Amino acid sequence: MTRTWPPIKTNPWTLGIPLILMLWALHSLDVPQRLNLWLYDTLITASPTELSPDIALVAIDERSLDELGKWPWPRDLHASLIDKLDAAGAETIVFDILFAESSAEDATLASAMSAHGQVILPLHLSPPSSSRLMTEYMPVPLLADAARSLGHAHVELDEDGVARGLYLQNGIGNRLWPSLSLAVLNDSVVTLSDSDAAPYTNIRQQYRAIPLAGAAGTLPTYSYIDVLSYPPAYEEFQGKTVFVGATAAGFGDVLPTPFSGLRKPMSGVEFHANAYSALKNDQTIERSPSWLSYALAVLVLIGLSLALPRMRPTRSLVLCASSVITLILAQALLLFYGHYWLNVSYALVIAILANPLSSTLRLAMTNRFLNRQLDELASGPSMTLPKPSHRHPSQLMSHLRALLQPTGWIFAQQDEVIESAELSLTDAPTFSSPGLWAHRNNQSWVQITRNDTVYTLGLKLPNDLSREAIQRYLDKLPLMNTDLDIPVERPRENVSARIERVRKATSQMNQLQEFIYRSFESMPDGIIVTDELGVIRFANAHIEQWFDEPMPSLNGLPLTRLLDGHDPRDTTPWHETVSETLTLAQARTVDLQLGHQSFLIHFAPFALPDGNQRGIIANVSDISELREQQRQHREAIDFISHDVRSPLVSQLALIEQLKRNQGPVETAQLDQLGTLARRSYNLAEEFVQLARAEQLTETRFYECEFLAIVENARDSVSEQAAGKGIQLVLQGQEDLWLNGNAELLERAVINLITNAIQYSHPGSTVTVQAFQAGHEACLNVIDEGEGIAKDEIPYLFDRYRRQKSSELSGNHGTGLGLSFVSVVVEKHRGRIAVESALGEGTAFKLRLPIATHLN
């Protein structure tokens, strides 16, 4: 089945405006900024940069403070450190120590600095207090003159307080100082000639993110006291740039970095050493301007707003996921290979939110659509059948009268008679319980309670065999409402209410489908439904049974192929009938023969309400019984015209002869006339008995004892048997109770015993056995006559069929006796068999089901 997903809307603003509003809300909460920083930290820490090999760090650590004393140290110690490093071959010495105040040892330190010639000193930009303006804290002039260059030691902290980079140029007014790391490579000071900034304005330029080589302690580090106390190894500092600064806890500046956060911050001198390494290796990262981030977000917003409303949910998810992955990959590639920090957070947030938002909008529209469909379903027809217990007693009385056509009735409310005919309240019996019928002979009464009001209904039924069946049917009718009136709490929550509506609509649809399905299956005719190409799409169980085709093979089978396979024909082939029904939209009715069964198939074209689909409904009616009745009707006419007419003609001829002869009537003539009259009577009687047997239904069954029926049948033919000198032997003593019609069963047994007497030799024995075998009552009638030819046994129970041997022997029968037996046995759901051999006799074996619940 193809699923059609409802589009959101073709207008891109339907999705775009909600995305903009959500992005603005998240921007006010700094979510995109935090996402940008987190994504940068994740990428940068996943691949640390390689450290330049010409860097060394001399740390003012805890051990140095313990041995050299409290800070500040005498500046001649720093002069000694410079001499030691100079002797070890250090190329450049960078102090991250601010010498802003004069000291007696300044001349010694300045001399050592001048002797080395490559010493870099820091300066600091900061207001003296919160109420003062920005100020430059420079080294004392003597030291500043001795330094090769000066650089600012300021490191920029981002919104989350983490140090990721610095400004390469920073200063007050129109003079910009290089950063401490940049001063190592370039000692020039930038003067902004065209700047009109105030002399106290903090000016910053060229922000660069610094890719760190790792967490704190990654750089090769030497303790300050060790370098002073022992001659440093030449290879440790030869040609290197040595950074000198504080790393002791609580001393100097500490900076949280992407590698450590606040757990293990990095010292400022180590951060500047990483910055120098990145600058020297050309690995500093330039941050993209804000407008580029916004432009990328707008581009992604427009693309997704145009694409998602036209896509299926699965493809929408794939597109959004692909957008997220592409943005992250783009940022990673630019970061590692282009050294460019592109802020994709705004575009990333849009890509992440677009799919759930579009799904929400689609679900909202689907919800509105389903609500409309649920409203239409709720207002549609219901196929549940109303229970009799829910009908008003007056309506119930009207329906019972229309159905049963009673000869009398009464309907009363409390003690007031509303309507009556041939019945009164004095005829009513005592009621045991409301809603239960009380039967007395042919009268049936019931009391019903509705809203504390008692109604009395009485029916006077026809006093015939159908009365008991009608009363049993009335007992099964549910007239009292047994449903408990439990208050149903309606769900307050919107989703639960909608689920409840869907449940009710689904239940109603299931009831409708079940009603239609059971209606098709319960129809007495076979039903076939085809599509516009004549291919079977539905068939009920009758079609499966009559055509002997399993249901899976019927579905999808062309109707013409099914009909040609079971009833092929040359004149008016099936494909013409089916195609004309579809093309001409005209109904057709055709005979159908399936084996020994006759059917009538009616083809009717149909079209669905939308007019786009057409097909055929074929109604297959089993007319085998009708054809059999027609055949029997023809046989009955032949029988009446010959067998019944023949003795009547003989009687009339004999009477005319007696009229012509005026003499006394002889006894032989009267005997002959009586024989002809009895033959006519027997023919009429057997014909009437057969008609009664064919009309027998189980509604006229009652409890009867089979052995007593057999004994009565034996007594009825005992005189006939004695006349031929035939001995009747009855074997059976057990009571055999069954549900049936005793009168017709007795007549059937009489026919079997009479048949045995008629074809038995004088002086022989006819044995009648009645016994129980399992759940069946058994009757065997065995004679010692001539027997029946094997080729005549299959036709023995056919109507109007006579045995050739019987006709030749002078035993003229009507051909209805055994046919009557067969019909009676069939109506009682039993079976009969014959065993016979020429010259040995015949045995008729009858089996009937026993009423087991009576045992």
Image (cartoon, rainbow, N blue to C red):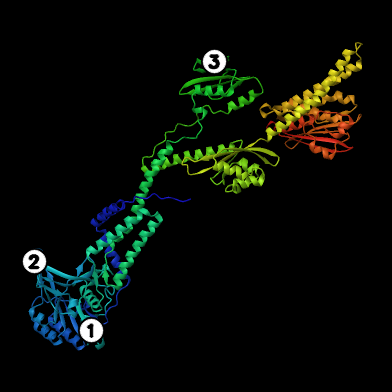
In this rendering, position of residue 358 left or right of residue 188: right
The image position of residue 739, as x and y in percent, is 70, 29
**Res. 850 visible in picture:** no
CA separation in Å, label 3 and label 2: 115 Å
- Residue at figure coordinates x 82%, y 21% from the top left: 648
Q: Position of residue 189 (x, y in %)?
A: 13, 77
* Dot label at residue 420: 3
Q: Is residue 836 above or below residue 269?
A: above
**Label placed on residue 736:** none
Chain-order first, disc 3 or disc 2? 2
Distance Cα–Cα, label 3 vs label 1:
126 Å
Kindly identify the residue that appears in the image at 56 percent across and 37 percent down. 519
Q: How many marks?
A: 3
Tag 3's secondary structure? strand
- In the displayed structure, would residue 166 be above or below residue 12? below
What's the amino acid at mark 1?
Answer: Lys
Residue closer to the observer: 300 or 128: 300
State left or right for residue 567 relative to residue 339. right
| Residue assigned mark 2 | 133
Camera-side residue of 307 and 39: 307
Position in image of residue 124 (x %, y %): 13, 72
